[in-house]
Image: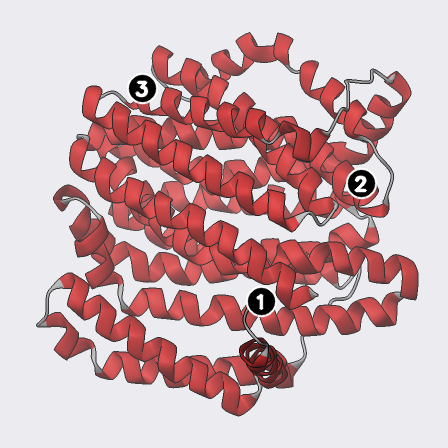
Amino acid sequence: MLARQTAVYFAANLFSAAFGLANTMIFTRLFAVTAYGEYLLGFAYATLLVSVLGSALKLAILREQARGSDIRGVVLAALLLFLPAVPAFYAGGRLFGLEPAVAATATMLALAMSLFEIGQDVLRAEQKTTPFLRGTILRALAVSALGVGVALASAHGAALLASSTCAYFLAATLFWRAAWGSTRPRFDRARFREIARAGLPFTLSMSLMALATVADRFLLAELAGVGAAAEYAASLDLVRQALLIPAISVSAAFVPMAVRLLADEGEAAARAGLARSLELLLAAALPACVGLALVSPQLADLLLGPDFRQTARFAMPVLSIAVAFQILTQQYAHTSFLLSNRNLFYLINTGSMLLFNLIVSAALILRFGLEGAVWGRLAAEMFGFANAYLLSRRAFALPFPPGRIARVAAATAAMAIVVRALAGEAAEMGPFAGLALLVGTGMIVYAGSALALDIAECRALAQGSLVRMRARASQPSG
């Protein structure tokens, strides 16, 4: 069941990321660096607002809706209560240095994203994977179609933010019944207070995490200009789009299962499930991170506009390793805080990481400019994981099985050695041909190594798939 749900979430995120990469290819070619920087900064602010608006509600959905307690009416009512705060959200955008039109459209985008993403969380909590997949696909199609239309008609970042807002509202509307059914807002002050009290530390920590994720680009924009922030953010967002897909897909499946195992069968069963989940998480994420670092030159030339490529060739390998630590922190270590109900630990981890990030990145940006922001991001993510690991030892001690980890590391190393050996030959080809050579070879080597080492029990999965295929083939047609 874990593998099947992971496959569905992976397909949904892969589809979304594919269109995100297509958007990057188009927007970095059609928009000037400064205009694209306005869009990226506005989107970053919207993401921050989404954390402020929805973190407590998402936590309540994960804990209660996943256990069969329907709280959708209360969640809808809570969302309505955020509308009077829209002027304050706009003012916050202005304080972050956004232009008036960018601040306004970023605020509206945050509302649309919150509505859509919370609806998707409801579907995930109820393990309705098919509507989740369809909703993700529709949103990706709408964002891309409307965004491309705007890119051809307007060169302003605010217009691109407005098109994304329309796309999220459209997707939330069309999949309303799948997520919410006939639910109506239910104003329950006691439940609001309960959700707020339980979710406040989590909201603060998720907001601080979102701020830690985007603070360096705002800091870089202030210290080195919007253009430098755009070049840096384009590389970082490209890396995240590619690498967070497998990690989020795996965690979307195993976190609700861990919650249920702990509730139904106890700590030993939950830890055993988490050990298998960590192996699956690493098996999906680690080769992707290392592989992307190795193919960064070809990927930059293929996906980014000419003004963004030089920065990307240097930045993407470093940022790929940074994202690997981010995955370990957010997709695995933070599960300890959820299972132990130690919401304060989210706050401690993200608050300390934000402070570390601001201090180190500011010092490095002042000394090295854009390159300083890249190294500051790596240092911040490494610090964040080390801090989260230490905190998890005091919450719900997570398993880090050395044998399972070693198998994934060995398969990844075999893949990296072969891909690195082909780097010179790939450099002489065009970006697409070189990328195809490196990625294709790397996938073959890693898949063979994974089967040989039986990573995440993939032999049984492959044998089961083969048996089902043979059974279908042997059935008489018509």
Q: Earlier in the sequence, mark 2 or mark 3?
A: 2
Residue 222 seen in render: no
Residue that numbered label 2 is attached to: 65
Tell me the quarter of the image containing the C terminus.
Answer: bottom right
Q: Which residue does the image show at 48% across and 55% down from the upper left? A: 245
Say few, some or many: other residues with alpha carbon within 10 Å of mark 2 (under 14 / 14 to 19 / 20 or more).
Answer: many
* Badge 2 or badge 1: first in the primary sequence: 2
Q: Amino acid at mark 3?
A: Ala
In the image, residue 446 lies at what x, y percent? Answer: 42, 81
Distance (Cα) linking label 2 and label 3: 36 Å
Asked if 370 appears above or below 47 in the picture, the reply is below
* Residue at the disc numbered 1: 281
Q: Secondary structure at mark 2?
A: helix
Q: Residue at x 46, y 87 (%)?
A: 449
| Structural crowding at the residue carrying mark 1, measured as other residues with C-alpha within 10 Å and reported as few (<14), some (14–19) or many (≥20) | many
Residue bearing mark 3: 159
Q: Classify 478 as above or below 160.
A: below
Spatial CA distance of label 3 from label 1 is: 37 Å
Q: Dot 3: what SS?
A: helix
Residue sitting nearer the eye, 183 or 301? 183
Name the one closer to the observer, 205 or 359.
205
Percent x, y of residue 149: 26, 26
